[in-house]
Image (spheres, rainbow, N blue to C red):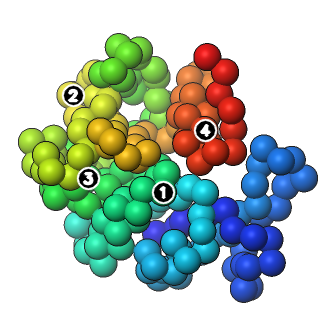
Amino acid sequence: MHMRWRIPPDSCDGRARAKSASPMKPSACSTRRATSAAEILATGPAAIVVSNGPGDPAHLPKVVAELQALVRSGTPLLGICLGHQLLGLAAGGTTSRLRYGHHGGNHPVRDLRTGRVTITTQNHEFQVEPDTLLAASGLEVSQVNLNDGSVEGLRHRELPVFSVQYHPEGCPGPQDSQGLFDEFLSLAGVLEVQP
């Protein structure tokens, strides 16, 4: 799992560091080693991204356990692709292999809250099974794929936690999914979103 978080610039301890001169783009560290929730939270992150990656999410039970602790912390959290699937597992759900994987830049997704449809870029073989999410987890389905009805997004009812199955950073349209990053940065307190 690859996580990025905001920490003081001198605290990367040899890990990859991204710095920005802009106050709207905070410094961040990223790690590809096994990292516990306690280690991540000890850095005082403004927000956490659980990014995409290969493989079957069901083979990552230790990551799921750490992700449950990160969700409970109340720190803004965004899951993308594999991160979305792991969040579904952290919510007590299950995942399954799609009959036909989602690949390419032409997948319509509907946001259930707004009704807005965006065309998304996707590259995955697994899905979160919607009927398996535990109500007590606070997570609910927020977006669906219009081609096959599969879960494309999860959102917590109370905490600043959400995820998408597709790749918003690879949007095929002119910034169709840019609003997701704006919302996430607003939750992290590093961007003021204008209505």
For marks 2 and 4, give the CA distance.
32 Å
Closer to the camera in the image, 23 or 63: 23
Quarter of the picture containing the C terminus is top right
Which residue lies at the image location 23% right of the left edge and 66% below the top edge? Answer: 58
In the picture of the structure, the residue carrying the numbered disc 3 is 88
Closer to the camera in the image, 71 or 28: 71
Label 3 element class: helix
Report which quarter residue 155 is drawn in.
Answer: top left
Of circles 1 and 2, the one toward us is: 1
Q: Are marks 2 and 3 in contact (CB under 8 Å)?
A: no
Amino acid residing under circle 2: Asp
* Crowd tier of the residue under label 3, counting other residues whose Cα lies within 10 Å: few below 14, some 14–19, many 20 or above: many
In the picture of the structure, the residue carrying the numbered disc 4 is 186
Label 2 element class: loop
Label 4 element class: helix
Closer to the camera in the image, 54 or 48: 48
Of circles 3 and 1, the one toward us is: 1
In the picture of the structure, the residue carrying the numbered disc 1 is 75
Mark closer to the chain start, 1 or 2? 1
Residue 58 is at least partly visible in this image: yes
For residue 38, side relative to residue 186 (left or right): left
In the picture of the structure, the residue carrying the numbered disc 2 is 148
Residue 54 is at least partly visible in this image: no
